[in-house]
Amino acid sequence: MASTSSTLEINDFAHKDLDDDGREKRTGTWVTASAHIITAVIGSGVLSLAWAIAQLGWIAGPTILMIFSFVTYFTSTLLADAYRAPDPVSGKRNYTYMDVVRASLGGSKVQLCGIAQYVNLVGITIGYTITSSISIVAIKKSNCFHYRGHDAPCNPSNYPYMIAFAVIQIVLCQIPNFHKLSWLSMLAAVMSFAYSFIGLGLSIDKAVGSEAKTSLTGMPVGPNLSATDKMWKSLQAIGDMAFSYAFSTVLIEIQVRAAGGWWPGMGGGTIIYVMRKANNEMDTLKSYPPENKMMKRASLVGVMTTTVFYMLCGCLGYAAFGNDAPGNFLTGFGFYEPFWLIDFANICIAIHLIGAYQVFCQPIFGFVENKCAEKWPESRFIMVEREVRLPFCAEFDINLFRLVWRTTYVIITALIAMIFPFFNSFLGLIGAAAFYPLTVYFPIAMYIARAGISKYSFTWICLKTLDWTCLVISLAAAIGSVQGLISDLRDYHPFKE
């Protein structure tokens, strides 16, 4: 009896610390989930919103931004219901976006989802390499303009700073367990809010008493802007806005983390335990709000907060700079003074992107390394960890395959960034490419499949109309961004002083 009692006590204690799937007990709320969403969304996309609204004007600009926010919120609620399958409340949990698609759709859709996700992640790491170098160059320009005058020829090359950024990433990439970089992720989030609020504050200051020209339709067609160029830039601006709301890629992971502090790939181990008193424990589980309802509320708060912030940054930036709003309002030198504050904001951008690069490249590293380990389990090159002692540092485990593969990846993304170092065009392309498949298509397709909605029914027609409309918009934005890249590349002179 003593042994049985002891076993029950141990199992009850284990159950208090673990959830119904054997993972760490979920203690998060919709508040923590909202915080994760806001942190994931607000980032470098905010820097281009003043330029985007300048292309579209006071009517189309805010309207399209609101449409993106509505679509993002709506599809995020559909995605929240897919976290558990087949039942959204009591079904089996899915821990990644691909797991969700596998449970709801299966087949080739899983591979298509994987391709869309990983191509998007690669594009984001390239975009962050571009943005970080532009920010570091902006610091040099800011000091140059301050000491030599606003008309001084201050045009340093981006290339040395892209190389420096790549070297930092090569070092950080060798850390094998992503949870060891959690401090870098938190620092990156703080830096993101810092430079966003600095940009907002500077825009408010400049907008007061500004005589910048604005219009209902944005930049006017004239001697400096043809009707064709106006169209391409407007489509590119739509892509930039789409990029600002590109958080569906990590929404499921946010739901997992916000629900309990465990993030896939971040060191959360599974502990097997025996559940006792099943009826009482199921009643206890039912007393908590279901994850899907909590996540829907978090999505609403997160998207509303972000949209208000985006509206302020975009509209106040447009009011401050007018139709001449720079592509990046912290590096395009709409602001010259106070130069030290602009320098600090750009330092924050660089630090944020150093951490954000790791957040987005780690899933790529994990996917490739796991696949290689499964295919060549006997390879010493892939499997063996070697202990290295560095001066003034603790012992460090290094894997030759990880060293070669991750270094190669960083070098390739840096080289692509050097070929296409164009902030707005590249952000627009990433946003257009990621928004439709990950934010619109898969959430809608999974909802139709799970709910068993009949083909050509009213609900089916409404959902498909939204799907096809977003597809057309995304394709148009992608075409506009590609044309922008071609135009920028044709006019680019990297070593011009």
Image: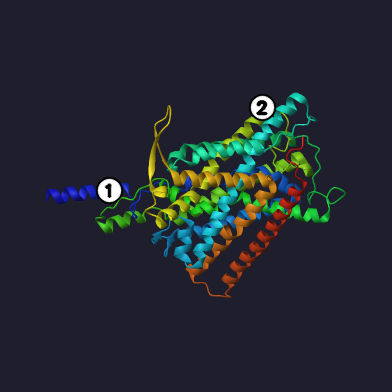
Q: Amino acid under label 1? A: Ala
Image quadrant in which you'd find residue 465: bottom right
Left or right for 492, reference 345: right
Q: Judge by depth and name the residue closer to the eye, 164 or 28.
A: 164
Mark in front: 1 vs 2: 2
Q: Judge by depth and name the residue closer to the eye, 450 or 351.
A: 351
Left or right for 488, reference 118: right
Q: Secondary structure under badge 1? A: helix
Find disc 1 in the rendering and name its residue.
14
Q: Residue placed at 48% from the left, 49% from the top?
A: 365
Find disc 2 in the rendering and name its residue.
340
Tell me where residue 474 appears, x and y as whole percent: 66, 59
Tell me where residue 486 appears, x and y as whole percent: 73, 52
Is 451 situated above or below 497?
below
Q: Judge by depth and name the residue closer to the eye, 133 or 328.
A: 133
Q: Coloring scheme of the render? A: rainbow
Q: Which residue is situated farthest in the left direction here?
A: 1
Q: Which residue is situated farthest in the top direction here?
A: 147
Left or right for 390, reference 285: right
